[in-house]
Image (cartoon, rainbow, N blue to C red):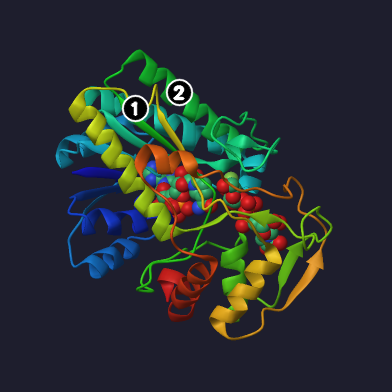
Amino acid sequence: MILVTGGAGYIGTHTCVELLNAGYAVTVFDNFCNSNPESLKRVERITGKKLQWIRGDCRNRDELIAALKQSGASAVIHFAGLKAVGESVEHPLWYYDNNVIGTLRLLEAMQECGVRILVFSSSATVYGDPHRLPLAEDHPLSPTSPYGRSKLMIEEILRDVQHSDQSFQMGILRYFNPVGAHPSGLIGEDPQGIPNNLMPFVAQVAVGRREALNVWGNDYPTPDGTGVRDYIHVVDLALGHLKALEALQAAQRAQTSPFSGCLTVNLGTGRGYSVLDVVNAYEQACGRPIPYQVAPRRPGDIACFYADPQQAKTLIGWQANLDLNAMCASSWHWQSTNPNGYHT
Ligand code: NAD
Ligand code: UFG
């Protein structure tokens, strides 16, 4: 049994599908502050399997202990957290409270219940401004927002806890830019309000919910002047969690610590695409033009950012397989069949 915190969210639902398909039993623990139980019904529809879900908050240790005991979980995948960079600048305490305190309480509950495997959603944002590209795991860590710093603080906590108790098997997964949706079109990203991120915004322009995309700057030192990112299909990302989980379970069975501390891997493709590359690929996928205008740079944005994905291949046997066209096609399938997300 795997306990999935934040399992009703965007990446969590896709990971639950892959876990259920691989034969794991799943309990989701979520307070639904940024999701909807409907997403879990869709997971059950896709897989034809049942999952348990518990409404609870990661900052509440007793609720976590009850969930671990009730489910009999042997491992936790920890997605629960807040993720909006701009909001974290305005309300840093929300981020330190939800993300950092939520993870502390989870670790305490795991210690109490003897659960010793944790897979954690970190972010490539922990690297900050790149000194060199591609970004490998040994790049210095220097996040530039409270959100990024909350992720780095959690990473440090996990390293300290694992160092103090070698029976803990911990995976730190640094995601690049997750996009796309399950090919069924039943689950996908469902942002509340105006999307901050590129692909969900483009998707809402394509479906007619928004008039035009603002391209935040075309004067970066990149081939077409727009920002370059390493977009990764959410299904590939979900499969990365299974690979990490299997590696940690194998280490636990062998009673070894093969990763000299926490298993730490980038989950990215190793390929960068510009904003205009994404717009072009999306136009192909949806068969209609995506109107856009060039606007000033977004404060804090980085010109170019992509992963060195080699370590994930070496340590957990994972690599991304799905390309930008598959990312856009699946996003469009989800968006066009659910124009208002789970409220459709
Ligand atoms: P999401 O908002 O769709 O999912 C997060 C889920 O956690 C939601 O269902 C929300 O209701 C739940 N949640 C939040 N706080 C909680 C709490 N205190 N207790 C219980 N549940 C809580 O986000 P996502 O895109 O699926 O991201 C999942 C994780 O991956 C997050 O930790 C995020 O920081 C990280 N991440 C996301 C991205 C991205 O671009 N999507 C990139 C890098 C890292
Ligand atoms: N962009 C636009 N217009 C938009 C939205 C984005 O031009 O409306 C551009 C941005 O300027 C950037 C690119 O599209 O060049 C990607 O922007 P996103 O907001 O989609 O993604 P970011 O790389 O800025 O940030 C994302 C997540 C962070 C995470 C980071 C690294 O939002 O949480 O990836 O993983 F930390």
Query: Viewed as shown, does residue 130 lie left or right of 183?
Result: right
- Give 230 or 290, whichever is nearer the viewer: 230
Q: Which residue is mark 2?
A: 157
User: Quick one: label 2, few (<14), some, or many (20+) residues within 10 Å?
Assistant: some
Q: Of circles 1 and 2, which is in front?
A: 2
Q: Is 28 drawn above or below residue 110 in the view shown?
A: below
> Would you say residue 194 is visible in this rendering?
no
- Give 214 or 320, whichever is nearer the viewer: 320
| Residue drawn at (43%, 18%) of the image | 160
Q: Position of residue 6 (x, y in %)?
A: 37, 48
> Would you say residue 270 is visible in this rendering?
yes
Instruction: Give the CA distance from mark 1 to mark 2.
Output: 10 Å
Query: Viewed as shown, does residue 97 lie left or right of 4?
Result: right
Is there CB contact under 8 Å for labels 1 and 2? yes
As shown in the figure, which amino acid type bears the numbered disc 1?
Leu
Q: Position of residue 165 (x, y in %)?
A: 31, 16
| Residue at the limit of the structure toward the top, as seen here | 164
As shown in the figure, which amino acid type bears the numbered disc 2?
Ile
| Residue drawn at (74%, 67%) of the image | 214
Looking at the image, how many numbered discs can be counted on the residues? 2
Q: Position of residue 319 (x, y in %)?
A: 42, 51
- Give 191 or 308, whichever is nearer the viewer: 308
Question: Which structural element holds mark 1?
Answer: helix
Q: Position of residue 316 (x, y in %)?
A: 36, 41
Q: Is 334 drawn above or below residue 105 in the view shown?
A: below
Q: Is 260 drawn above or below residue 32 in the view shown?
A: above
Q: Which residue is mark 1?
A: 107
